[in-house]
Every structure is written in structure tokens, then in C-alpha cells.
Image (spheres, helix red, strand yellow):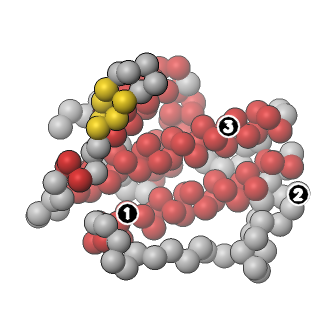
């Protein structure tokens, strides 16, 4: 079952209509791999996903050796998916005839250590670090997103 999501009268509506559905499909399938299948009431059916030790491959990944390892993998992939979304949003925005001002979505950030950055800069840094430290995770996620039609280049300078 597909979640019902509102795309009417949301910020950057036209652009989000182009890209959100592709990311929502990846997001929903990742949730189903971890939590399990959805029943007719859109709730997760118990004991059918990584959370319950059940193998359910997702984009080349599968449950961990322990429930804790499965949860850690799910959290990492879930967070990474939305980092990649930020880059895909920017990638699609700059292709538009009249792009949205970057300042509307590339917000300033500050890390716990006081380091300042931006949303896109942080996303690119996260992906570069991941590519260096955990290439299997990087290649799996970026491959999934590229399969949805996005270039996703963590080394891009814009």
C-alpha cells in the first residue's frame, strides 16, 4: 500500500512533485525492509522485516547479524537517503528555467563542535566521508538513487 502524501500548496510544490515520489518509493521500501510488510490498514505486519530478524533484501542490503546491527543499518540508510534527497533537490532545481533561490533550501548549519556549513555542503561532506569509510553503503545508496534518475555527485562544486 502506498502512503497518501500531500503535494498541494507545499513549499516548492512543482519541484517536489517531480522528485518526491521517487524518493518516497525508496523510503517506503526501506521502511518495509526494516519494519515489515504493510497490511490493508497501512500498519506494519509484525515479524516480517529486519527488526524481527527476517531477511528482506533492500538495494543490496539485508538484516544485520543482531537486531541492534539491523537497527544501526536502517538508521544509517534512512539518514543517508535524506542527505541524498537534499542533493537531488538542488540538482533538479538548477535545471529549472527559473530556479528557486538557493538560500530558500540550502540553509546555514552548525555542528556540535561549532563548525559552520550549509545543508548541501554537509550532505556532500557526509557522502564523501561515507565513500571513503564505507564504500559498500555509499555505492548501494547512490546506486539506488541514480537508478531513479539522479546524478548525485558528492564532489560537485556549484
Left/right placement of residue 117 relative to residue 37 reads left
Q: Are marks 2 and 3 in contact (CB under 8 Å)?
A: no
Residue 120 visible somewhere in the drawing: no
Residue 23: percent from the left, percent from the top? Answer: 47, 59
Figure quadrant of residue 17:
bottom left
Q: Secondary structure at mark 2?
A: loop
Left/right placement of residue 39 relative to residue 88 reads right
Residue identifier under label 3? 73
Badge 1 or badge 3: first in the primary sequence: 1
Badge 2 or badge 1: first in the primary sequence: 1
Is residue 38 shown above or below 105? below
Is residue 53 shown above or below 65? below
Is residue 73 shown above or below 14? above
Label 2, label 3: how far apart the Cα atoms are:
18 Å
Left/right placement of residue 82 relative to residue 44 reads left
Q: Secondary structure at mark 3?
A: helix
Q: Secondary structure at mark 1?
A: helix
Label 2, label 1: how far apart the Cα atoms are:
32 Å
Q: Which mark is residue 19?
A: 1
Q: Are marks 1 and 3 in contact (CB under 8 Å)?
A: no
Residue 84: percent from the left, percent from the top? Answer: 42, 45
Figure quadrant of residue 157:
top left
Residue 66: percent from the left, percent from the top? Answer: 84, 34
Residue 31: percent from the left, percent from the top? Answer: 67, 56
Label 1, label 3: how far apart the Cα atoms are:
24 Å
Residue identifier under label 2? 47
Q: Is disc 1 surrounded by few (<14), some (14 to 19) or many (20+) residues within 10 Å?
A: some
Q: Residue at x 37, y 48 (%)?
A: 86
Amino acid at each position: 500500500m502506498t502512503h497518501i502524501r500531500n503535494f498541494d500548496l507545499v513549499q516548492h510544490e512543482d519541484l517536489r512533485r517531480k522528485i518526491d515520489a521517487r524518493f518516497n518509493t525508496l523510503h517506503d521500501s526501506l521502511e518495509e525492509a526494516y519494519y515489515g510488510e504493510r497490511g490493508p490498514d497501512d500498519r506494519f505486519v509484525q515479524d516480517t522485516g529486519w527488526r524481527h530478524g527476517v531477511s528482506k533484501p533492500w538495494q543490496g542490503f539485508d538484516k544485520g547479524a543482531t537486531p541492534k546491527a539491523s537497527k544501526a543499518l536502517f538508521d544509517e540508510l534512512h539518514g543517508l537517503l535524506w542527505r541524498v534527497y537534499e542533493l537531488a533537490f538542488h540538482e533538479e532545481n538548477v535545471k529549472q528555467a527559473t530556479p528557486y533561490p538557493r538560500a530558500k533550501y540550502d540553509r546555514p548549519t552548525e555542528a556540535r563542535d561549532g563548525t559552520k556549513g550549509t545543508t548541501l555542503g554537509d550532505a556532500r561532506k557526509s557522502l564523501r566521508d561515507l565513500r571513503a569509510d564505507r564504500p559498500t553503503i555509499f555505492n548501494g545508496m547512490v546506486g539506488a538513487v541514480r537508478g531513479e534518475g539522479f546524478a548525485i555527485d558528492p564532489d560537485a562544486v556549484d
